[in-house]
Image (cartoon, rainbow, N blue to C red):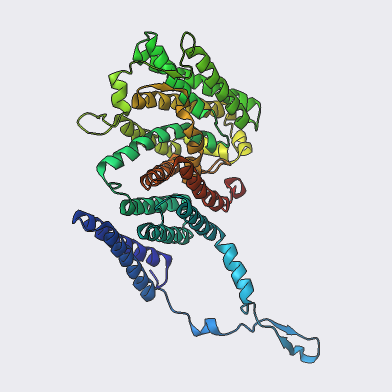
Amino acid sequence: MTRGSPLLTWLGLAIAFLVAGLGFILGFVQRLPALEVFFYSVATFAIIAWVWRYYTVPPPTAERAIPDFTRISAAPGAGGEAAAVTPSAAEVSPRAEFRAFIRKNRVLLLSAALLVVGFLIASATVTGFLTLINIISGLILLGILILAVTVSQFFAQNRSAFIGIMVLVALFAVGSITVDGFFSAQNIKSMLLFASFLGLACIGQTLVVLLGGLDLSIPFVIGAANVGLLYLIGLGVPPWLAVLLILLAGALIGTLNGLLSFRLQGQALIVTLGTGFAVSGGTQILTSIGSNFAGNVFGQVPDWLKNLAAMSGKTLWLDVPPVIIIWIAAAILLTLGLKHTYYGRQLYALGGNRTSAARLSISERRYWVAVYAISGCTSALTGALLLGWSGGGFIGVGQPYLFMTLAAVVVGGTSLLGGYGGYGFTVIGVLVLQVLTSFLVGIGLKFEWQQAIVGLLILPMVALYARSPHIRSQI
């Protein structure tokens, strides 16, 4: 391990992070002021990292300060004597250096500018937002964002995952400082509960995106399943059988989406959107027969379904809603399955290069239809679980998921062109969006402001991932 080696640098960062993290945990255990604990932790990390860098990175040598006069043009003549000496390109104008800096750090500068603009707009429109604690929190968030983007340049792979984790840590730290009770067990359980609904809805979207497609029928299937399940229970169908019928219907809708979008190559977005509208409208027509509450169904939700998804639900002896355990289990199985199974590798091969996959005799149609069927089934499952949480059927319950499923996939770093990413990336995106939403609600921002700020988060993330070459160009 030589002086100045990357391994030595990473060892120093790991030591600094470990020491600062231990101080952060001990500070909260001793119930010290949150702001004081955070600032001491950040200062500890910065000092250790700076000292380590100072003593491990070699100083510039005298040779680097000597101009390069090796480019010598020999004039034609007797003896080929040197006619002129041309200095190297080291003498670059300040304007050129500034332009090079802008080009190299354009994503970071864009992210910082959007964060500052959002803070200024919120300060001008939200009463009582411009406070010292919010200014300090904004500076902390900006500092961690700069650190994340800067350090991520040393990652050859999984760069998006690293940035997502850093953003998640930053949001959680800032939320713990500015919002009372943000770090409480009750709030953490609440965030995990809502993240579970979004995470389950994102299973199908992630698989579809890995093939280079999109599924815009997800929110409509969620709403239709939410209403349809309670409608079937109201007709006297046993609840367990009603759930199975709803899951089967979701899978059939997904299969139809897959067949139509495969047949009409490049039209998946329009096809799934049209199917979603048809499913939503048909469900409302069916459930409105003999009722004055079109789009809403009222009835008795089974206790076991409430226990699955309600905040008060319990998993055996644990005071944790079972839907959280279901999502964790699904995330582990799906992440490992995509990485280590034959079917997972074929899915990535199709998303990366269809022509190469076809030459390997991988059936694109079979995989395309299968991922859309899974998407329909998981969407229906999400709608059924949301019924257990709300206690009443509402056709519009899935509307927020039209934007949030795509946002979670993008923020996580899965490529919309297909072939790169995975559900583990999406889990990071889901947690980032949920912690961000809880933080924005905690500081009193309205729903439209929440949407605007989430949009400002997505823009630099998309710009950052767009800089990476697509997998097709690497084969």
Q: Is residue 369 left or right of residue 426?
A: right
Q: Is residue 263 above or below residue 19?
A: above
Which sits in the foreground, 62 or 48? Answer: 48
- In x, y percent, where is residue 398? 46, 29
- In x, y percent, where is residue 156? 49, 56
Quadrant containing the N terminus in the rendered view: bottom left
* Image quadrant in which you'd find residue 133: bottom left
Q: Is residue 464 left or right of residue 193?
A: right
Asked if one can make out residue 343 in the rendered structure from this viewpoint, the answer is no
Which sits in the foreground, 370 or 44? Answer: 44
Q: Going 49% across and 60% down the picture, which residue do you hit?
A: 153
Total labels drawn = 0
Most distant residue in the right direction? 77
Q: Is residue 378 left or right of residue 74?
A: left
Q: Going 33% across and 16% down the picture, which residue do you hit?
A: 300
Q: Going 50% across and 53% down the picture, which residue do you hit?
A: 121
Q: Going 33% across and 70% down the picture, which residue do you hit?
A: 47
- In x, y percent, where is residue 45? 33, 65
Q: Is residue 295 above or below residue 76?
A: above
Asked if one can make out residue 397 in the rendered structure from this viewpoint, the answer is yes
Which sits in the foreground, 293 or 62? Answer: 293
- In x, y percent, where is residue 192? 34, 38
Most distant residue in the front direction? 127
